[in-house]
Amino acid sequence: MTTSPNKKQLTDILSERNPSVDWETRLNPPSRRLLGFLEGISLRLEAPVQWLIHDPRFNPLYHTGTITIFLLVVILLTGIYLTMFYPFGFTFSYKAVASIEANIVGRIIRAMHRYASDLAVIFALLHGWRTFFQDRFRGPRWLAWVTGIGMAVVVWFIGITGYWLIWDERAALLNQSLFKVLSGFRSGQTFLVDYLVGDAAGTGWVFMMIVIVLHLGLSALVGYFLWLHLKRMSRAKWMPPRYWMVISVFVLLITAALFPVGMLPPLNSTQLPAEAPIDLFYLFYLPTFLRGPQALFWSILLFIVGISLALPWILPRAKELKPVQVDLAHCDGCTLCERDCPYAAIKMVPRTDGARPKFQAEIDPNLCVSCGVCIGSCPDNALTFGDIPLNPLWKTTLEQVTEKKNVKVVFTCERHAIHGVGAHFNDPNIHIVPLTCIAMANPNLAAQALEAGASDVQFIGCPPEDCANREGNVWLDDRVNGERLPKLKPNFIPQIQTAWAAPTDFGRAIKTQVKEEANAFKLKLNQTHLRFVLPLLGVMAVVTAFQIWLSNRPTPFYGDDSATLAIQMTHHSGYAMQDVPPPPTIEPDLTQPIRITLTVNGDTLFDETYTATDNHINQGARIFEQIHLPVGKHHVTIKMYDRLDESFEQVIFDKTVTLEPRQALTINFRDVHIPDPKAGEQIYYENAAGVNAGCRICHSLTKDERIIGPSFYGIADRAGERVPGMTAEEYLRQSILEPNAFILPGYPEGQMIQNFGDILTEEQIQDLIAFLMTLEEK
């Protein structure tokens, strides 16, 4: 057998064997040659997997899209289970996850959630790569590509929020990355002080609620993107074949049972992690982001995402690649083309020429990908690529068969013609008929080839679930088996062979003497399939081991010479601050900007001005600034200017501090609190468990009205008489912080919430007491 044709020779051969296709325009634009080159490399890399598994229906590379969706379903179901046992709060959340990990069922489900999340990334990346080199990302298929990129970005953010929910050392690294992002914005600093690092954050339930809402809300966004992703496809497959779902769950269960994900130490806000295992599928950015300038990181990230989104237009399809056209003279309105189109690009409309039948096929050029599936579905050859007639294909094929006699005719698709046929084009005993898609072949052409003297007729197309045009191999298989119109005549069915294989496996496929099944969803597992399942499990074991290795990489972050110094402040202009000598005059002015300077060892590291804001949690300016310093002693001076007279300077901190290795030192400033009865009244009426008292749930303000606890009517008059030696304010404070210290007769012990000291800040307790002291008998 002679050598394979070169690119120029290949185009000439394809044009000679099938003159009904403009092969020059289809194959030779620079972008198409690039994609063909990448596909050739990828097919060679995939060949060992196919050789090992043998049956393409068990090759995971051909099910990457549907397996990804199935893994997302597994993630959703396991996530719902985990959420059922998840309270909100910094320490609460960590303890809850530790409790889940201590239970064997919870431990396995948590590990399945984690491993399914990582495997979903692997299969999604494989799906995206194969979509790219198979040229399924541009032209009318741009929406699926763009939404796929969008899903990848959203899933990345979901993974990040998932690791935050554990509140362990990895969460400490995520906090550091959040500090780096938000501290550059005034509103970001306000958020950090109110919800993460300040006293107002309390138990952290609000922050953790925000994280889990993002985690779940972004998951819903993935569902919307997925709907858009499949929107333009006819008969879109959401799930893989049943046997693939069973295999996937089996692999996840065994992996989760053998390799639990375990727990890291809890987050320590005063210490930076020296080293932490990170999941490179989601937290790959942390080492670079925490060590380098964030402008560089965001520039690289936006560049990669932007280029990926723009690929359909950076590498556009050839403008000369014409969509399918309808020859009205031959269209009888049978609807077969509309039914078979994989992309819903054909619809039946009233005829425009007034002839019978009443309807004709209409092609939407914005949806047609020029695959040719509809051409093979038309029994009357009424569909063509642009204005190129279809008759030359029939004429050329039958002339070659008649001339050569006793030759084997092999119909094959574009992918096989480019990457698989090779020297078989020059085999005198075989006549290769190239098609844009295997489903471009009309079964009657195969019948006529047999009648003209062909020794055999064979169809060789893409593997099950790997057709570049989604359904081409399945539709052709059904046609030649007499199960789909246009049907092959019954007497010819036994004489036709079919083979569905990767292009690199063309040499094996052409020797096949049987009909292979193209529809993986028709497979019913039995004992004979064990010889394929076992090597498949071996492949999945290798993939899973690689995934576990990548998702648990010990990574150094902060060395012995690293430390941080942070300034945290909630301040009203002109107010006195705790542990700071009071200014000679108090001039409250919430609108006056606040200027802060920080000097370390005589060098001014920042000089910033802040304005007051009010978000109903705190008033005044909220400030959070963090700097990295070497370990050792440093003289730190912090000055504040908060008066109209800018020369009025307060030195609010002037000390020498010693920073230990990886210490995260925070210098915290807050105003001397002035109890506010109105703020306390708001706390009384709030009912958000975990952040405010919600006293009204149990205590009425109406005289003698008992809900659960006693009425607060007149409590200001009675509180000072309850416990000898205690003032009214002292008694109220004890009742809030130590509910069982004094039990009012007629009420059971332990009925009141016992941890208001954790739920409320000191300022909130003072405000609540101030409100209660206004409740006098009228």
Image (tube, helix red, strand yellow):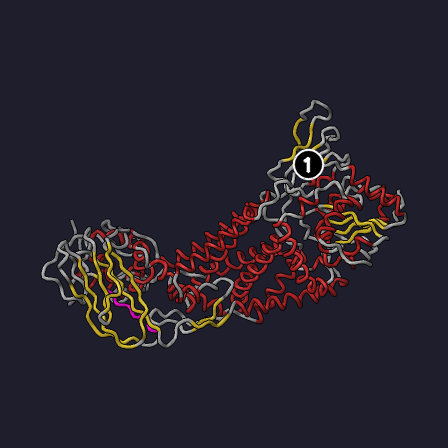
Amino acid type, label 1: Gly
* Residue 248 or residue 502, whichever sits in front: 502
Relative to residue 481, is residue 329 depicted above or below?
above
Say if residue 775 shows up in the picture: no
Magenta stretch prevailing secondary structure: strand
Magenta highlight range: 662-669
Asked if the stretch drawn in magenta spans residue 666, the answer is yes
Q: Position of residue 445 (x, y in %)?
A: 81, 41
The quarter of the rendered structure image containing the N terminus is: bottom right
Q: Position of residue 715 (x, y in %)?
A: 20, 56
* Residue 755 or residue 236, whichever sits in front: 236
Q: Mark 1 falls on what kind of element?
A: loop
Say if residue 591 shows up in the picture: yes
Q: Going 85% across and 50% down the picture, which residue do you hit?
A: 408
Splitting the image into 4 quarters, where does residue 245 fall? bottom right
Relative to residue 315, is residue 661 depicted above or below?
below
Q: Which residue is mark 1?
A: 386
In the image, taking residue 432 as reference, residue 560 lies left or right, namely left
Asked if the stretch drawn in magenta spans residue 540, the answer is no
In the image, taking residue 550 as reference, residue 530 lies left or right, namely right
Relative to residue 749, is residue 32 depicted above or below?
above
Q: Going 39% across and 72% down the picture, which residue do you hit?
A: 558
Splitting the image into 4 quarters, where does residue 662 fall? bottom left
- Residue found at the very far front of the displayed protein: 8
- Residue found at the very far top of the displayed protein: 354
* Residue 775 or residue 580, whichever sits in front: 580
Crowdedness near tag 1: few (<14), some (14–19) or many (≥20) residues, C-alpha within 10 Å: some
